Image (tube, grey):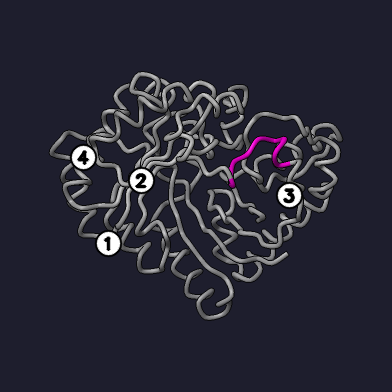
Amino acid sequence: MKTASVMLQNLCVPCACRCRYCLLSWSGHCVGVDYDRSERFAGRFHDWITAERADLSFNFSFGYSMDHPQLFRALSFLRSIGSVSGEFLQCDGFRFRSDDEADALIRGLSKTGVKALNFTFYGLASYHDRFAGRPGDYDHMLRLIDSAAEYGFKTSAGIPLTQESAPQIDGLLDALRPHGVGRVFLFVPHAEGRGVLVDPIRFSQADFDSLSADARALLNTGRFRTEGEWISSGRCAEPENRSLTISLTPENIDRLEQTPFDEIIAEVERLDDRYYGALPSRAELAGLYGDSGGDRFYGERDLFWHYQKRFIREHGLSLYDVTDERYSGSRRY
């Protein structure tokens, strides 16, 4: 298993939404550490990797949202170390701003080197606001998109597909079109984090068939397929690479600041090895649980995540969960 990248994260910035579907299971309580302290640590980690582990890519990120109280300064640091989020800003969960404040935000971003802004829409206005847990969120994001268009930003909108959102897709596409969103794409949400709460309304073949041709064209059906299609394709090859996440928390920051970086990397690699070493191969999991007639859509990784969690439950395994992205762990691919 080749370690290809390291993501250092600090979940220290609140999110203004409380979405039903949230990778990081935002509950109103940040699990990160003081931002300035994490930035100093990230700078040293970046310099060490550049000098000692040129085979690894390195990124630093903060969350739960990117609405940092000193956003422009934070983005400047991200760019200085080559982090992708220094140029690509996820705009979900930003606090409400007046028209003038929204313009000031976007105008300021235009001077920082940010090139692209992304937004997530769960459906039409009333449904989106309920799903996001914040009345007015839909209109707020459209206001930011309108400002972004004035300053020449590339904008994109991702739309999660569920049984509930599918009937709204064409109306949502029509609603977004006048705002000049550069790219709109559909995706099937995973069940990690609070995504497990929307699994009962997972997108199905019948939902896909109900979409217009224009909407179907916006879903990457190579990346998202029904369970039956995944099983029939025989796509059970084991991942060869992994990306490590090192999450800074009040419980680990003192120790990590005193630990050599190569040991920090090795520690998370061991967590990954122990977790997957306790589980069957993908081919075995597909044999145990795969349904060749399954009509619900998954990403490949998400499908095997389901199988792995089922195996863990059925066998009563007690494992550190490297897939919980609030904390240190890994992604295999």
Left or right, 134 with respect to 97, comes to: right
- Disc nearest the viewer among 1 and 3: 3
Numbered circle sitting on residue 235: 3
User: Mark 3: which secondary structure?
Assistant: loop
User: Mark 4: which secondary structure?
Assistant: helix
**Label 3 to label 4: alpha-carbon separation:** 42 Å
Write down the region rendered in magenta.
Answer: 222-230
User: Mark 1: which secondary structure?
Assistant: loop
Which residue is tagged 1? 113
**Label 2 to label 1: alpha-carbon separation:** 20 Å
Which residue is tagged 4? 146
Whether 27 is among the magenta residues is no
Which residue is tagged 2? 183
Left or right, 244 with respect to 305, comes to: left
Which corner quadrant holds the N terminus?
A: bottom right
Closer to the chain start, of discs 1 and 3, is 1
Question: Do the numbered discs 2 and 3 sit on residues whose CB atoms are within 8 Å?
Answer: no
**Label 4 to label 2: alpha-carbon separation:** 14 Å
Image coordinates of residue 47 in percent, x first then y, are 47, 75
